[in-house]
Amino acid sequence: MSATKALDAKAAISPAGSPQQSSPTLLQRLKKIFSAGPVMPGESYGAPGRGKSAAISLVTASALLLLWFVTTTAGWIDPMFLPSPVAVLARFWEVLTEGFANATLLEHTGWSMMRVFGAFALALVTAVPIGILMGVNRVARGLFDPIIEFYRPLPPLAYLPLVIIWLGIGEVSKVVLIYMSIFAPMALSARAGVRSVAIEQIHAAYSMGASRWQVIRHIILKSALPEILTGMRIGIGFGWTTLVAAEMVAAQAGLGFMVLNAAEFLVTDVVIMGIVVIGIIAYLFDMLMRYAERKLVPWKGK
């Protein structure tokens, strides 16, 4: 036997003389998936949850779609309650080209995006400054905190009649209703971001001659930015949730209006299609906010 063959034979045998262990078992693979991520340079232990999860998400989504397709194709569920993915896709193309409820899918989407992102823009320029002001000033905190904490737990449908009485049934009431649902989480997130700033950084800035405005601008605002971005992500989610309630009253177009109109006539495929479109738009915006977090606050979580 040559030296190479002898080395190969030796490598195939464990120190105890038995063959080496084969590929890892299913249990070992599951433990690896749910264990802490790999240790980064300068760390002693892997951080819980660290690591890529895109493949797991892709498998999960594919499994759900396959389950949906199998159950509907086999006839286990009545199409009136859950139409097949093929029927929903066909309805998507039909609404995109021919329309539904006197508007095409692009028109419905455009109206809803205008309402949600218009309210989001208004909340961004009002809620964030008020939240920062609440964090740095006790008078502002005493003025705004009771109001925000009082209406924040209320569902939008609770104060929808009051908004209609005050502002009518036009576009203004719809935008204001969505704005109110977005305002509270954004303001409170900005306030929490201010409260999380390390006092040592503020003292260091003052000791070097910084003014109060410079401390707010260069220390507090930058340190609070991760919480502000998180509040923006939460707020836009509340906005899309409130959209259906806002479009219940005198709306002529919109994704929420389309879903409600289809539900009245038991057109389930349009209902599911509208829900999927809303989910996709919200998910894309959330991905955009995650990208902004990576670029604007690369130190977050480190």
Image (cartoon, rainbow, N blue to C red):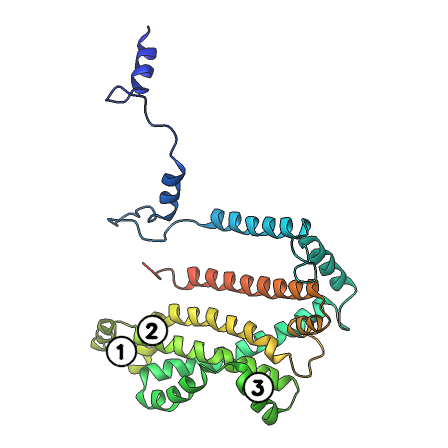
Q: Residue under circle 3?
A: 160
Q: CA distance from mark 1 to mark 2?
A: 10 Å
Q: Earlier in the sequence, mark 1 or mark 2?
A: 1
Mark 1 in CB contact with mark 2 (< 8 angstroms)? yes
- Locate residue 183, reporting x and y percent: 47, 80
Q: Residue at x 33, y 76 (%)?
A: 194
Mark 2 falls on what kind of element? helix
Q: Assign the N terminus to one quadrant of the image.
A: top left
Look at the numbered disc 1 and give the secondary structure of its residue.
loop
- In the rendered structure, the answer to whether residue 130 lies left or right of residue 219 reads right
Left or right: residue 121 compared with residue 300 = right
Specify few, some or many for label 3: CA neighbours under 10 Å numbering under 14, 14-19, or 20 or more: some
Nearer the camera: disc 2 or disc 3:
3
12 or 214: nearer the eye?
A: 12
Badge 2 is on which residue?
218
| Residue 184 image point, x, y percent | 45, 80
Q: Residue at coordinates 61% horizontally, 75% vertically from top-left?
A: 244
Question: Would you say 159 lies left or right of 231 here?
Answer: right
Q: Amino acid at mark 2?
A: His
Cα–Cα gap, marks 2 and 3:
40 Å
Q: Amino acid at mark 3?
A: Leu
Q: Residue at x 39, y 43 (%)?
A: 30
Distance from the alpha carbon under mark 1 to that under mark 3: 46 Å
Q: Earlier in the sequence, mark 1 or mark 3?
A: 3
Q: In the image, is residue 40 above or below residue 125?
A: above
Residue 94 vs 175, above or below: the answer is above
